[in-house]
Amino acid sequence: MTTVAIPAVRGRSEVLKAAFVAFTLGTTLVFLTGFSHIDNVHNAAHDTRHAMSFPCH
Amino acid sequence: MIHRVLTVGLLAGLLAGLLVATLQYFITTPLILAGEVYEAQEMATPPAAGHDMASMHDWKPADGIQRTAFTSIATIATSAGFALILLAGMLISGDAITVKTAFGWSVAAFVATGLAPSLGLAPELPGSAAGPLLARQIWWLGTAISTGLALWLFLRSTTVIPKLVAVALLAAPHLIGAPQPIAFESKAPAELAAHFVAASLTIQAALWILSGLAAGALWMRFNKLAPV
């Protein structure tokens, strides 16, 4: 019984780990381009922030 | 698994981001440039409280190729972010990642981060009056999370209570209300601003949907070659 269950559990934890990494990197990218308060980053991404209807200056 | 998710997310971001950057060049950037002409006129008069103009005096990309390049890079990065968030959502929910599922997720994501926040904070043409930036960002983020959770609960629950919770989550940010400007100060014509609202929501929808479709298609393609 356990020999069947363990790979399934391991598979699910592998999926959740990948999802966590993807979510963290994904939100970091969106925050960097769309929400950063660093002036140079804001200015570089300015037109994209407006075009995506993110709140801007 | 991690390697596959990152490869698909970043590649999908590159493909969809390049396509949407091209759309922006023709659709939203000309409107932003036109808006900045009116914004420059407003800067001749003192700004209203809460209007942050500090960023206008620092480095910014020069108009032309440099500005287009930075905008395109920002859109590609945002697209990769969108694709990775969609992949994470489908993996956590245990959905099979296909073009069809990814399409559904991307439409729902647009409702959460595009339609719902725009009801309180209309997309702004440069020079539009607005409340303090941090307060608007917090409201925007709260609305996106609350609406996203509401859609997930409403579409996946089979009983009444979670559906009622979903409706409450959907309404809560709008009952609280978004931070609004003290006074209207834009000198841009209303027609230009109205066109920009429609254009920017369309661009955000295009970015979510194309990022999702690319991620779904690439995931299926890679899975056919080497299943994970």
Image: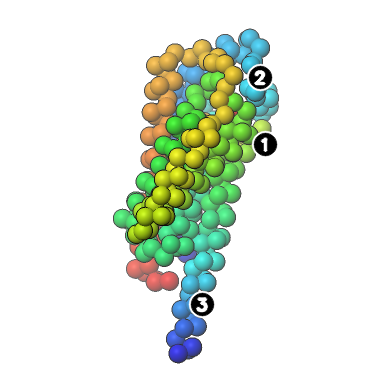
**Disc 3 target residue:** A10
Q: Amino acid at mark 3?
A: Arg
Q: Are marks 2 and 1 on the same chain?
A: no
Identify the residue at horizontal 44%, vertical 38% (top origin): B116
Q: Amino acid at mark 1?
A: Ile
Quarter of the figure that contains the C terminus of chain B: bottom left
Coloured how? rainbow
Instruction: Tell me how far mark 2 sits from mark 1, CA to CA.
Output: 20 Å
Q: Badge 2 local density, few (<14 within 10 Å), some, or many (20+)?
A: few
B17 lies above or below B182 = below
Which chain does tag 2 point to? B
Dot 3 lies on which element?
A: helix
**Disc 2 target residue:** B49
Q: Nearer the viewer, mark 3 or mark 2?
A: 2
Which chain does tag 1 point to? A
Q: Badge 3 local density, few (<14 within 10 Å), some, or many (20+)?
A: few
Which chain does tag 3 point to? A
Of residues B214 and B67, the one nearer the viewer is B214
Q: Amino acid at mark 2?
A: Ala
Q: Are marks 1 and 3 in contact (CB under 8 Å)?
A: no
Instruction: Tell me how far mark 3 sits from mark 2, CA to CA.
Output: 55 Å
Q: Nearer the viewer, mark 2 or mark 1?
A: 2
Left or right for B151, reference A33: left
**Disc 1 target residue:** A38
Of residues B131 and A30, the one nearer the viewer is B131
Q: Nearer the viewer, mark 1 or mark 3?
A: 3
